[in-house]
Image (cartoon, rainbow, N blue to C red):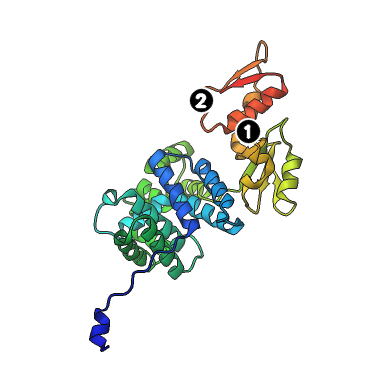
Amino acid sequence: MNEQARRRTPKPYRRPKKDPVRILAFEALRAVDERDAYANLVLPPLLKKAREQGDFDARDAALATELVYGTLRRQGTYDAIIAGCIDRPLREVDPPVLDVLALGAHQLLGTRIPTHAAVSASVELARVVLGDGRAKFVNAVLRKISQDDLDTWVERVAPPYDDDAEDHLAVVHSHPRWVVSALWDSLGGGRAGIEDLLEADNERPEVTLVARPGRSTKDELLAAVGEESGLPGRWSPYAVRMAEGGEPGALEAVREGRAGVQDEGSQLVAIALADAPLEGSDERWLDACAGPGGKAALLAALAAQRGASLLA
């Protein structure tokens, strides 16, 4: 076969490779976008199902967790970068495509995954969940993003601070503009203070557990997490910090609902309410603004120790 004929011969079709980690991360992002779901409530059941199917080990779970939370944490910045790489308004790009692009951008700009692996894995994901046609668009955009690092991109896409300080901070620190404005108004002061606050707000948090009193203990959780990873909370008497990360859903007390994942700030809110002085009998408690139920679960445990009941 001569060279010209060889060039005309189409390559055989190759089926896309299914990557369980990235497919799970994509499903979590879609749930957050479509249903306004809480990522911390969506992700654990997906991880549990993957473990039960034998698709995941601890490293897979850790990568999936980083991809979901890391992408959401810097989504505002990634959206601005993606917008700088396409020739149409961002709102005209289908949301599932944006989720794949944001996942790819995070792998390129926010992790140590090699460039070629981040692009290749994202394109394969696009082929699986979007189809070959849109995967080509994903490939083109991610190759543009891969040409520079995060700092260079931020400098390019963020409006100058002197022109619009709030919009600049919103892009640089990946916070909605109205949040930047509200925090700045509350904090007062100049640029340094608000930048420090926004940077701190983007730090990867430790996983913190709560031992619901009467149902679990801090010592039980510390033993389950292990000496090398488990640390007592700094402020809450019921808190245990998973300093080395890990999968909370693998702990027996968490699986049984005797303990849960809850940051110390939320624990302190419940503790402060339970310790508030009151008049009359201490028998019936009401939580009139419960959301996912984390603080309500702690309140219910505290109430039960006093012989009271909680309605949430």
Query: Spatial distance from mark 1 to mark 2, Cα to Cα?
Result: 17 Å
Taking the image as shown, residue 253 lies to the left or right of residue 49, namely: right
Residue 133 position in % (x across, y down): 29, 61
Q: Considering only vertical position in the picture, is 309 above or below 140? A: above
Disc 1 or 2, which lies upstream in sequence?
1
Please name whichever residue, 39 or 241, is drawn nearer the observer in this view of the structure.
39
Residue 93 position in % (x across, y down): 29, 52
Q: Taking the image as drawn, is residue 234 in sight? A: no
Please name whichever residue, 312 or 278, is drawn nearer the observer in this view of the structure.
312
- Image quarter (top left, top right, bottom left or bottom right) of the N terminus: bottom left
Q: Amino acid at mark 1?
A: Leu
Q: Considering only vertical position in the picture, is 255 above or below 79? A: above
Q: Considering only vertical position in the picture, is 148 above or below 65? A: below
Residue under numbered circle 1: 268
Residue at 44%, 65% in the rendered image: 118
Residue at 44%, 49% in the rendered image: 27
Residue under numbered circle 2: 289
Residue 247 position in % (x across, y down): 61, 49
Where on the picture, by quarter, is residue 307? top right
Q: Amino acid at mark 2?
A: Cys
